[in-house]
Structures are given as C-alpha cells and as structure tokens.
Image (cartoon, rainbow, N blue to C red):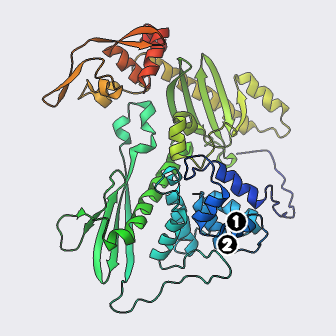
C-alpha cells in the first residue's frame, strides 16, 4: 500500500480544446492511406468519390464552409478512409464536438463500430479501397438500421416493409469460434506471438424468402460454405447466388472483427505476464522482454528491458512496446496499421540500480512502493534476459526451432530459402532430395559457399532471406559464433 497521503484538489472540469482543425485531421489520415493509383495519399477528389458526395460540396464540408453536417456524414468520411474507431471518434470531436460512437450492444453505433473494426487492414486491398462506406451500409442494412445519411436534405433510407412474394432476408444469429496454432511454436520465440497463428470460424444462420440456411467460413480459407437443415455436409456457396451477394460481407466482417480482437489481445503485454524474445540485429543477438507493472496496476505502465551488445537497458513505458520490436515493419503495418511504431511511449530509461535510486531522490513526490517496484523488476528482468541469452547459446531455447518446425521434412529448408536449384534438389516419391552438400553463390563480386548447416543456423537466427544469409556469411565464416 502507498503510505504517502495524497491530497486531491477538486477542480472545475474544463472544456477539451481542439488541437487540430477537422480538415487538417482528415488530410493527415489521408496521407498514409493507399489511393487508387497506388500512391500513399488519398486526394480530396478521390475521397469525395469514395464517400459519394459531389467534389465541390465535399470541399465545402471539409473546410466547414457548409457547417452542421449530420454525424453520419463524418462517419462516412472516416469509413471511406478505413479509420479505426478511435480515429473516427477524434474526427467527430474535431468537426463539431460530436459524441463518439456508442459501444452499447445492439444499438446502431454498435454495428457501425463492428463494420469499422472489420475494415481495418483492408485499406491496402486494391479490390476493396473504394468500398469502406458500402461495408458500413451493408452491415446497417443487414441489421435493419437506416443507412448512413450524407446530407441534412436527405432523409434516412429506412428498410422497406417487404410484401409477400418479395425478397425478404435477415440474419438470425452469428457465432464465431477462435482458434490458434500458437502451441505449435512453443519452442520458437520469434513465432509464438505472430498474429497469423490466429484463426476464426464463423457460422451465420440466415433467412432468405422464408428458407433457413447456414453459412460458414474459416478465416484461413477464401470460400464460404452453405448448408440447410437437411444437408449432412456443407457445400461451397456460388458467388453468383443471392445468398452470397446478400450475406458474404457480413460473414467476412464477423471473421475480421473477431480476428482484430485477437490481435488487440496479442498486442498488449498485460494479457501475457512476462513476454521475452530474441532477434538478430546489427549482426548480434538482442534479447528483450516486457512486463506490465502488476505491482501498482493503477499506474498503467510497462517495463521494457533489453540487452544489446552486452549493455542492459530498462525502460518505463506508457504503452506496450513488445510487438513493435517483435514484428517486422511490414508485419506491423499489416496487422497494426492503426497504431504508431515509434518509441514515443518510452518515459524513462535506466542502465543501473544507482540511476533508479538517484531518480527517486530527485522526485518531489517520493514513493517507496514505486521505487521498490522499479528496482525489483530491473533485477528480475535482467536475470531473465541473461538466462535467455545463455539458453540460446546452449540451444535450450530458440529464436526459431528448426527441428520443431521442419523436423518431419528436414529438406524443406531449401524451399524456405528458395535455393533448390543451387543445391540441385529434385523430387522423388513426394520427397525432396538434395544432390549437393554445398552451393556457391555470387554476391557483390564475391563467391560465397553455403552448406545445409549454414541454412539451418540462419533459419534458427530468424533470417528469412537468402541474401541476408550470404551477407552474414561474408562477415562470419562460422555463423554459430554469433551466439557467443
């Protein structure tokens, strides 16, 4: 317990001031979104087309020359840019202090949130970049809500009552089940926390013209399956059918939405206790770990530690840093494009216990409990990283375990690095046979010889590219010495 008495001054709540105008905020988001021509910047004209508003009118809305636009219009602009819920709420605030999206289950905003979350990551899909608003409207339509209203002059488009003989449809229920292949990589530090280990299986009961059908899809498969109550087995749903056209987007959104939830759980170390890993960086092994401050959880801070080139650093962070270090730049962009990859969350870094003690001596509000927490975690995390480094060196732990991943197919290492030709590999009775023990590669006017053992060591160091293996081999004749 904190023994220090903390006095709280009751202050009048002040209005939150805008630190940015609406138009600048939308332009800022547009800068990092993929356009139809492949550039990273969605221009105003293209954005107006995505939303479905005349260009000149859209410019006036952005610059607030046509103020008092409906809340739905701002949501549509954000949907067209594949904004996250947080970004959408900021846009509503910047436009006219509008309330953020209401997450109350079952209300209209709830389904808008579902669609926005399902859209995250699709902004890099050329076949989808113009369908952000359409996705939100489809979700609203399937759940019997009015579509997004883009103008005060336009009445909400309510769903019409369908008379007998019409095309009536509805979703009765949706059920999603999460699964993970994570345990297959329990001995491979660099694979255990990869987002692609997750999968979702979603089943949806739908009603079309009075008939009940069950649609299903697994996130790792592209096909949607259909089954009625009398079928023993499902069959692939034809993309030209009304069932597919009407409900496929809702089924895909449900899958994506549940995947995003898994990714968010994966992102935050507070859900995992102590997380640790290692990677090859600047031709040396860096070991790192992270832990939430469970001793004083109300501080909402994280401890991030690493040993690089023999130097130990211990940082206090405002948010989780682990996945930023764990994933490659492209992987982080793929799964967490709505998050920042910078180290802005680092509040303070220490290199010794003495630095921590000196820091607390200078603090105005000294806390014994907080100092103890910092000191204890500094020591325990350093010990954990030193143990990890020794275990890597002695092959008790692995960045990536070759035997566990390719144990049944040891020659898959040649396919992994795409060097079948160089090692003269052939297929015999569904097996890969390598006819060369070594292969010579030309790189930067040099000839470098690689063996199968070199490829395995490189794989276990977490290297994915053959050119990186060759470059490393030029500097280190024995790749195993990198562990020393």
Where does residue 305 sit, x and y in percent of width and height?
Answer: 61, 29
Which one is nearer the viewer's eye here, 298 or 421? Answer: 421
Query: What whole-number distance in Å separates the C-alpha atoms at marks 1 and 2?
Result: 7 Å
What number is the disc on residue 418?
none
Q: Are marks 1 and 2 in contact (CB under 8 Å)?
A: yes
What number is the disc on residue 92?
1
Image position of 78 (left or right of 265):
right
Question: Mark 2 Cα within 10 Å, few/some/many (few <14, many 20+)?
Answer: some
Where does residue 200 sit, x and y in percent of width and height?
Answer: 38, 55
The residue tagged 2 is 71
Q: Residue at x 47, y 87 (%)?
A: 160
Asked where in the image residue 460 lies, by quadrant, the reply is top left
Q: Residue at x 61, y 59 (%)?
A: 46
Asked where in the image residue 456 lies, by quadrant, the reply is top left
Where does residue 98 sit, x and y in percent of width and height?
Answer: 72, 69
Q: Residue at x 28, y 17 (%)?
A: 423
Q: Identify whether 453 is placed above or below 381.
A: above
Residue 414 visible from this viewpoint:
yes
Residue 99 visible from this viewpoint:
no
> Mark 1 or mark 2: which comes first in sequence?
2
Q: Residue at x 61, y 84 (%)?
A: 155
Q: Identify whether 17 is placed above or below 441.
A: below
């Amino acid at each position: 317990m904190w023994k220090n008495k903390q006095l709280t001054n009751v202050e009048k709540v002040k209005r939150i001031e805008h630190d940015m105008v609406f138009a600048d905020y939308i332009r800022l988001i547009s800068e990092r979104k993929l356009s139809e021509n492949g550039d990273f910047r969605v221009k105003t004209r293209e954005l107006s087309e995505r939303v479905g508003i005349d260009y000149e009118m859209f410019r006036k809305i952005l610059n607030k020359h046509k103020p008092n636009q409906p809340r739905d219009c701002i949501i549509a602009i954000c949907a067209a840019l594949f904004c996250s819920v947080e970004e959408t709420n900021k846009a509503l605030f910047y436009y006219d202090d509008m309330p953020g999206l209401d997450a109350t289950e079952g209300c209209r905003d709830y389904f808008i949130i579902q669609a926005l979350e399902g859209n995250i990551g699709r902004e890099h899909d050329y076949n989808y970049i113009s369908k952000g608003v359409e996705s939100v409207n489809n979700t609203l339509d399937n759940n019997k809500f009015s579509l997004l209203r883009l103008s005060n002059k336009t009445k909400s488009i309510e769903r019409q009552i369908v008379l007998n003989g019409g095309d009536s449809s509805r979703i009765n229920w949706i059920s999603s089940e999460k699964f993970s292949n994570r345990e297959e990589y329990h001995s491979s530090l660099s694979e255990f926390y990869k987002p692609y280990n997750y999968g979702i299986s979603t089943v949806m009961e739908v009603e079309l013209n009075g008939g009940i059908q069950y649609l299903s899809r697994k996130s790792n498969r592209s096909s949607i399956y259909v089954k009625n109550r009398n079928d023993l087995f499902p069959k692939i749903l034809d993309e030209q059918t009304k069932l597919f056209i009407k409900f496929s987007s809702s089924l895909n959104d449900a899958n994506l939405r549940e995947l995003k939830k898994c990714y968010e759980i994966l992102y935050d170390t507070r859900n995992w206790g102590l997380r640790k890993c290692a990677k090859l960086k600047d031709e040396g092994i860096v070991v790192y770990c992270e832990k939430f401050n469970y001793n004083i959880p109300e501080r909402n801070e994280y401890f991030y530690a690493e040993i690089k080139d023999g130097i130990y650093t211990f940082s206090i962070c405002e948010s989780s840093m682990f996945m930023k270090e764990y994933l490659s730049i492209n992987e982080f962009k793929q799964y967490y494009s709505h998050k920042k990859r910078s180290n802005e969350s680092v509040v303070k870094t220490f290199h010794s216990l003495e630095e921590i003690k000196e820091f607390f001596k200078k603090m105005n509000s000294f806390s014994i409990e907080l100092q103890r927490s910092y000191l204890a975690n500094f020591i325990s995390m350093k010990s954990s990283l030193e143990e990890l480094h020794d275990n890597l060196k002695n092959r008790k732990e692995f960045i990536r375990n070759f035997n566990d991943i390719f144990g049944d197919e040891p020659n898959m290492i040649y396919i992994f690095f795409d060097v079948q030709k160089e090692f003269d590999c052939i297929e015999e009775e569904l097996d890969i046979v390598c006819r060369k023990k070594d292969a010579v590669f030309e790189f930067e006017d040099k000839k470098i010889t690689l063996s199968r053992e070199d490829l395995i060591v490189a794989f276990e160091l977490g290297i994915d590219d053959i050119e990186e293996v060759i470059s490393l081999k030029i500097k280190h004749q024995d790749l195993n010495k990198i562990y020393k």
